[in-house]
Image (spheres, helix red, strand yellow):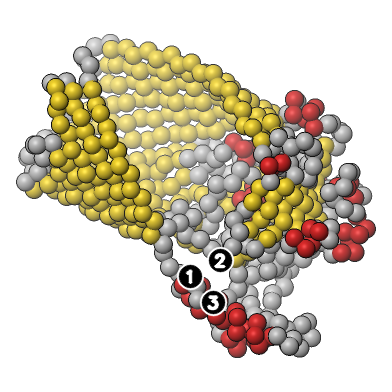
Amino acid sequence: MLANFRFASMDFTQKNQAISTVLELKTHFNSQWSNSFIASYSAIKDYRDPKSNNIMFPQTEIGYNGGTIFLGNDREATVFNMKQNTAEITDNLTYKTGNHTLLFGTHNEFYDINYGFVNALNGRVSYKSLADFFNKLPTRVRGTYPFDGSTRDEIFNNPYAKFKINMYSAYVQDEIRVGEKLKVVPGIRIDYTDLPNKPKLSEQVQNSPEDPNYGTTYTYTPLNQIKNNFFSSALVSPRIGFTYNVDDDKTFVIRGGSGVFTGRIPFAWLGYAYYNDGVGYGSYDKNNLTAAQVAAAGDPLATGGLNGYHDATPKVQADLIDNKFKMPAVLRNSLAFDKTIDGYKFTLEGMYTKVIRDLEFQQVNKTDNPTYFSYDTKHEMPIYAANINSAFSNAYLLSNTNKGYRYSITEMISKTYDFGFNFMVAYTYGDSRDITNGIRNSMESNFQMNQSLTPNNPQLATSNFNIKHRIVSNVGYGVKVAPNNTLSANVYFNAQSGNPFSWGFVNSTIAGTGQAAGLAYIFKDAAEATKYIGVNSAGVPSATAAQQVADYEAFINGNDYLKAVEEHLHKEMEIQLLGTFKLI
């Protein structure tokens, strides 16, 4: 199997410039009152300089032996010029009285962003095989172009997507000591996100027709009901933690807590919503192309060849954010027991996290009147054929979901000896489920790379970040070579389950959807495989059909993953030699 191969023309130089300054003021008023004030400012510029001799040559993707060959100019480097200015203000006021330590704080961030990125201005052309590439038969052609005719350099120097975002937060915490053994820490935090100027809603969005088949396999907010009223409410996050010393000598400690924690989303997704607003840029996406269609449109790699794939009536891509969309949040709970016996510390800790709001990405321009392959008797993989609104090349929606959870149980033992030797070893068992990993830089990519049979209604599946088993250990030894100098050596060991993966197809799907990764269907037995492998549309098997089925069965039976999911253990060992010298 071939891993992805990139020709040198795809290379680019990433250039980064960053300037930052911080002001910190700590004030101690008296034994009860103190304050910490921090103000900072940073200016960051990131841009890419393509190495290709022809910056506007399309990114070309050729499927080959399970991998992809890339040539041309990188679609994400043709126009990439980011500027971000950030100001942050934090103030924490502490008040101590009796058995209480109160903290009153605020943290505020102010962003001014020029999102100078346009995806595939140079076009993106996909071929299923080298043979198709040599025969000039692409399977998919897509890209973006400005309605005002701006050149690449004009777009690079004057970004279309410019916006500001302000994030405010205030919090209160009280550390309460109850007697000599118990400490309780309740708190509450309030977050509010402000977007002074929301993305534009194009006429195509506001006047989009509704699907008469709405709700058959997936639900969403119809586009003509999108109001851009996301980030419209404050988010309240209460939490509480405790520590209880069972024994007076603190050799047995019970600790834990529960609370709501609010996160954030990458601002790149907002940037896409601004430039894919359906006003400034047109978009085209021709998928599952036939030889006749390519012959009529022309070779997309020829000079000006992409123009043949533009629509007579320009289409747009809409990247939208659902009504009342909120930043992601989870409810996190933990409980731990620490017991020390003869200097050996034993720890048992459990954590459980439940999603309150996570992320969901949908392609919401597909008529919900699907068909199914004959072997899909449970109707698990809907095939959508028609678009709801012909004015869109694609329409993506970012919304919230309450699906998802993760948990872990950790056992650990550690000890430090008087003569300088120390060790720690821990084992963690965990599991995590979600409906999307949310690591891609755009709504489109997050949808396309979601390995789900129903990406518009994804079901809980093993998270890409799931680590079922993990063993970590550290062994160290320190020697004092002088009163203020210590020489130490440490050996760190990590062994963990391999990253989960799915078996499927890259740059294509069985259903012919717009996804960039599709799951493979594994026939339940040779009898079922015989109905489909080497059989033409009329149901007549070819002369080599029986051999093809035999080869298929041999391949399946020879692969442990396809027979049963197997975890792969990745071991990693790192040896560190550290010298620590303290100077007074």
Residue type (three-letter) at the residue carrying disc 1: Tyr
Q: Earlier in the sequence, mark 1 or mark 2?
A: 2
Which quarter of the figure is the N terminus placed in?
bottom right
Q: Name the amino acid type tagged 3.
A: Ile
Q: Name the amino acid, label 2.
A: Trp
- Secondary structure at badge 2 equals loop
Going by the image, does 389 lie left or right of 215?
right
Question: Residue 49: horizontal and vertical position, in percent?
Answer: 69, 31
Q: Are marks 2 and 3 in contact (CB under 8 Å)?
A: no
Q: Nearer the viewer, residue 467 or 418?
A: 418
Q: Is residue 376 above or below residue 69?
A: below
Q: Which residue is mark 1?
A: 561
Residue 234 x %, y %: 51, 36
Residue drawn at point x = 25 percent, y = 39 percent: 490
Q: In terms of sequence position, does the residue under pointer 1 or pointer 3 come before the other?
A: 3
Residue 407 falls in image quadrant: bottom left
Which label is found at residue 23? none
Q: Residue at x 72, y 53 (%)?
A: 61
Residue 435 placement, left or right of 506: left
Q: Nearer the viewer, residue 73 or 177?
A: 73
Which residue bears the numbered disc 3? 556
The C terminus lies in quadrant: top left
Element under label 3?
helix
Mark identifier at residue 503:
2
Q: Secondary structure at mark 1?
A: helix
